[in-house]
Amino acid sequence: MNTAVVGATDVKDVTVAVRVCNQAAALDACLASVLAQSIGTDRLEVIGVDDGSTDESGSVLARAAHQYPAFVRAGQVSPGLSAAGARNWALSQVRGRYVIFLDATDRLAPDALERMVSAGDAYEADVVLGKLESSGRHTVETSMFRKNQAYTDLYASRVYWSLTPDKLFRTGLLQRRGLAFPTDMLIGDDQAFTARALIGADNVSVVGDAPCVVKGPSPAGRATLPDRVALASRMLALVASQLPEGPRRDSLQSRHLEVELGKATAAALLSATDAAERDQALWAAAEVLRTQASPGALALLPRMVAVRFALLAQGRFAEAQRMAAFEADKDRPAVRKTVEDGRVFTTLPFFRDPQVALPDELFDITGDMTVTHQLEKANWDGPMLLLEGFAFFEQLSTKDRATRVVLRERTSGAQESCSVTARRDDALTNAKGRPRAMGRFSCRVNLGQTSSGWPLPPGTWDLHLAVGFEGVTQEVRLGPKRSADLDTTARMPVPIGSAPDAQGMELAATPYYTESGGLCIEVSRRTPLPLPRQA
């Protein structure tokens, strides 16, 4: 093994750690993609680790180290040491400010490191995710790479759903947190390492405008179903050790419940060929659900998965198998919804089945209802604010309308509201092309006479839309989604009436849009302007 001492003057911008295990055929392309980086070889180093290969992988690494001794170093670990051990050796040799871990089947886009290092430096990011792309028929998770993100919220974004180590990690973060790949895990050591880095990072950035890492197929290997359940348990425990109880922990744990435990139990229920292995996995999963899955994390899961988990936790494996088959059936009929007392329920199998007695809350999808809306006009007629636009639920019809415009004072919380008039538009549809004909609205908001009989009081009033159909109501902010031709620059005060508490003063309303696009009305007292002279 190469154990050259790293000197303080040898610091590079980025270290690329490449692990290879019997992948000599792919290794040349991987190394070539690194050596061709636009950042320049003077700013990077390559540490190649042969993880006990029996093919020519070691020779390919040795040849590269001999050809490029200034920035390529090679090492070899004992056969069977584990991928974690190989990566940890590479980590011990790092002299870059950042480090990225690749497998020999991966390739870098020509400017990947330049763009990722630039993002890390510009935004002081401890971890930078570069957009992933598949090199073949296998799939990679891409939902977190839809755009560049300078600063991400780990608990509200999709960033945590990518736990492969092909990211740019700030070496100082790894040293400060004492991070290494755990060597006691049969599978998933890369997940554990990346999860701890993301949780410990002060900032995580995303380079999502173009592919950075082209992913090759994962190394062949068969993890047993019990191994996969054990991985889910290990990751749930890791998150619990890093975060206190609450929404942030629930958010990250829901990912491991859905991905690791969800996929493992579906495989055990539908495709397991070894009955003993299947039963071991299912009983282990039931124990994980009973002891490690919080109600908050379970509430964030897709309802089909949540129902399957509830059945597993009760030991109802036959019913869970039926639920898993229903999930997997691509030709199943659309699931009906039922609305009761302002709540929406999905009528999945076992909904209000007296034999299993699952709680209604398990089928409640009210929080999943999404509103499509747009403000199209905002004009004045004296003290009357005239609003037009559309708003409807994607998942519900536009019958039983009860939509209202709501004005809420920012400091006191005082509130005024007025109903809207529905306008039929047969061309209005949801994202799936289904009609939402009565989703258009118009509203005349009389600022000169509120529910008290007086003009709207002084203050800053934010405008919202309480969208109500079929007995279900959801509030959205008016303004951020608006027509491109809507005038957002006019800020002329509009007189709305006499000030009831200040003799000789009048109230004026000034419309404006916040930085995030929300429509506001600022009401203030002023001395009435002089009337124009009569000719």
Image (cartoon, helix red, strand yellow):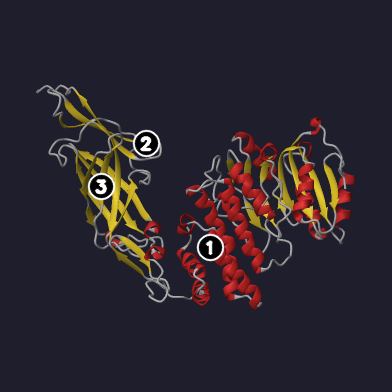
Disc 1: which residue: 289
Sequence order check: which comes first, mark 2 or mark 3? Answer: 3
C-alpha distance separating marks 2 and 1: 44 Å
Q: In what element is the residue under mark 2?
A: loop
| Nearer to me, 355 or 101 | 355
Mark 1 belongs to which amino acid? Leu
Question: Quick one: SS at disc 1?
Answer: helix
The residue depicted at 60 percent of the width and 45 percent of the height is 198
- Vertical arrangement, residue 501 with respect to residue 53, above or below: above
How far is the residue under mark 3 from the one under mark 1? 43 Å
Numbered label attached to residue 514? 2
Q: Position of residue 187 (x, y in %)?
A: 69, 59
Q: Residues within 10 Å of mark 2 (few under 14, many from 20)?
A: few
Q: Is residue 441 visible?
A: yes
Of residues 489 and 367, which is closer to you in this image?
367
Tell whether label 1 touches label 3 (CB within 8 Å): no
How packed mark 1 is, by other alpha carbons closer than 10 Å (few <14, some 14-19, many 20 or more), is: many
Q: CA distance from mark 2 to mark 3?
A: 18 Å
Say which element carries label 3: strand
Which image quadrant is residue 113 in?
Answer: top right
- The residue labelled by disc 3 is 405
Measuring 62% from the left and 64% from the top, which residue is drawn there?
229
